[in-house]
Amino acid sequence: MGSIAEPTELIDRFLKQSVLGETPKTALLRFGKETAKLLWDSVSRETVQWLRNCHFGFFELDCLLIHGSTVSVSDELTPQTPPWQMLDRLQRVQANHLFCGRSGQVFEYQLQAGSVNSSVTTLESKQPVQTITAPKRRVVGVGNVGREPGKATYTLYSPYSDRLEFKTVYYGNKKGFGN
């Protein structure tokens, strides 16, 4: 994103590129040109520059907070994601807790501890068996603000007690906390 060009010019330039695993045309269809312009008009150029310099995610203790997944910002993990794919995303960074926000959903996806034995057999030989073990791990959808008007969902986590809690806040006409 440039700091001088008009948003419509940037959007047209964006349409010619492929960014973050999602085609630009798909992204614009999903979020709309008006949303991109509103975002452009709402965020200062200094903030844009700051965001460009931010890290991809935050890794603290054995927890990774990231927008998409360890594969891509646009990778959307949900409760329907297959277990092998979740394990792959966790194994890439050796995190036991992956907090992701791309789907906008609040969920807890637990992978129990276990192991996988594998070997390769060819016509000429058989390779020795390799065992890969993985501890208990989980992927957590952290929620969103604004996908459903008047409702914000979020996640609280304490790494010291391993306590996970999902919260909902209603704003606008129906204000307050709920479960």
Image: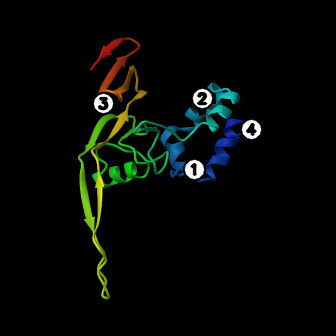
Q: Give the distance between the C-alpha atoms of the residues marked 3 and 1, in whole angstroms.
A: 35 Å
| In this view, 109 is above or below 161 | below
Q: Residues within 10 Å of mark 2 (few under 14, many from 20)?
A: few
From the image, state whether disc 1 or disc 4 is nearer to you: 1
* Secondary structure at numbered mark 3: loop
The residue labelled by disc 3 is 162
Q: Position of residue 168 (x, y in %)?
A: 33, 21
- The answer to whether residue 131 is left or right of residue 147 is left
Whichever of labels 2 and 1 marks the residue nearer the N terminus, that label is: 1
Residue kind at label 1, given as amino acid type: Val
Q: Give the distance between the C-alpha atoms of the residues marked 2 and 3, in whole angstroms.
A: 39 Å
The residue labelled by disc 2 is 38
Q: Position of residue 21 (x, y in %)?
A: 51, 52
Residue occupying the point 60% across, 36% down: 54
Residue kind at label 2, given as amino acid type: Leu
Describe the colour scheme in one phrase: rainbow
Q: Residue 19: which disc?
A: 1
Whichever of labels 4 and 2 marks the residue nearer the N terminus, that label is: 4
Quadrant in the rendering for residue 160: top left
Residue occupying the point 27% across, 70% down: 129
Q: Residues within 10 Å of mark 1 (few under 14, many from 20)?
A: few
Q: Give the distance between the C-alpha atoms of the residues marked 4 and 2, in whole angstroms.
A: 15 Å
* Secondary structure at numbered mark 4: loop
Whichever of labels 3 and 1 marks the residue nearer the N terminus, that label is: 1
Answer yes or no: is residue 61 visible. Answer: yes
The residue labelled by disc 4 is 5
Residue kind at label 3, given as amino acid type: Asp
